[in-house]
Amino acid sequence: MKPNFDTIAEVLRNAHTVGVASHIRPDADALGSTIAFALWLRECGKEVTAYNEEGSTSKFHYLPCHEIVVMPPSAPQTFDVFVALDTSVKNRLGSVHEAIAPGTPILNIDHHISNENFGDVNYIDPSAPATGQILFEFFQHVGARISPEMATNLFAAISTDTGSFQYAGTNERTFSAAGHLIACGVDVSALSRAMYDSQPRRRFELLRHALNSAEFDDDGRIATFSLSLELVEKLKVLPEDNEGIIDHLRSVEGVEAAVFFEELPEGKVRVSARSKFPRIDVCKVCKKFHGGGHPMAAGARVDGTLIQVKSDFLKALSDEIRN
């Protein structure tokens, strides 16, 4: 039988020690979901540890109780159950994976259509616009009290992963969840200022570079920008500064897809792709490069140089657009 919310509750019912984590280079859905779930588990009397490879990055210090998310230890830890949230592929847990003792049962809760079902129990709902949405509905199902802190983390998760409630997949289910969370104590105005109106100067400089150096291919249907290691050093930007900048390129009239190429120290290139229309499946393109995600928002980490990866990816994306 396909796992349901009762299955999740049963897996956790007799667990005393529970680990919770989300993917590397976390966004607000990853961290917000991790924090909210960890807070609920503590209310249930569990001994909970929340991890992320980068801990709680400064960008997300507006999330209530963000400090409970810590970097993983070097030695494997034993848990009765380990919960992976918003993570489509096991290696996307990064160094957290090494902190899980072999044999630990893994509960995998996610909304990415490309999820590889790597857990012992997998609850995957691609119709949910955010993992935070799944957790909200789970909490409702089990009759959990959603505290203001949990509600704020879940609202941030849903708001950001839906592009402030504008991406495909946003529907009455999404707004119903948002309304319930506001009733649980979310200060929407204060949270929105923290999420969208409190950017560091270095991120502004990165955006300036992206807009000044943007390139347009395939008769203007594809917009791209690239970030080299040299420029990272020059601008002193952090990985967390990159999120959302690609959306400025996608917003240009005539652009059907946008791609961000980021050179990484280990001889790889991080690719982030976004499409404007459902007919352009960037997840399908990213899968060709061993990545994944959603049909309209996906990514990959590809071996090679910035120039070569960009050339190969743009060819594959152009083929997708023209088919």
Image (spheres, helix red, strand yellow):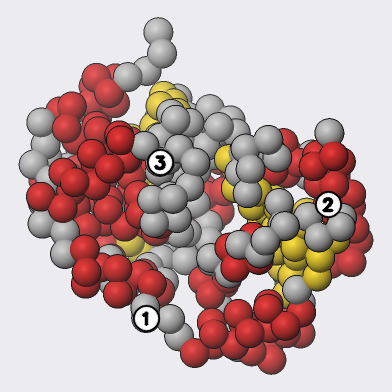
Closer to the camera in the image, 219 or 263: 219
Q: Quadrant of residue 50?
A: bottom left
174 over 188 or under it: above or below: above
Q: Position of residue 280 (x, y in %)?
A: 70, 40
Does label 1 or label 2 sit earlier along the sequence?
A: 1
Q: Is residue 307 above or below residue 278?
A: below
Amino acid on which the number 1 mark rests in the picture: Ser
**Residue identified by numbered label 2:** 313
> How far across and how far down the image is residue 36, in percent?
24, 50
Residue count near mark 3 (Cα–Cα under 10 Å), binned few <14, some 14–19, many ≥20 = many
Q: Earlier in the sequence, mark 3 or mark 1?
A: 3
Is residue 94 among the parts visible in the rendering? Answer: yes
Left or right? Give the position of 305 relative to 65: right
The residue where tag 1 is placed is: 198
For the N terminus, the image quarter is top left
How many labels, in total?
3
Q: Residue furthest top?
A: 1
Residue 78 in sight here: no
Label 2 – label 3 distance at C-alpha: 28 Å
Q: Which residue is mark 3?
A: 170
Foreground: 319 or 202?
A: 319
* Residue at 67% in and 61% down: 253
- Give the x, y percent position of residue 140: 16, 32
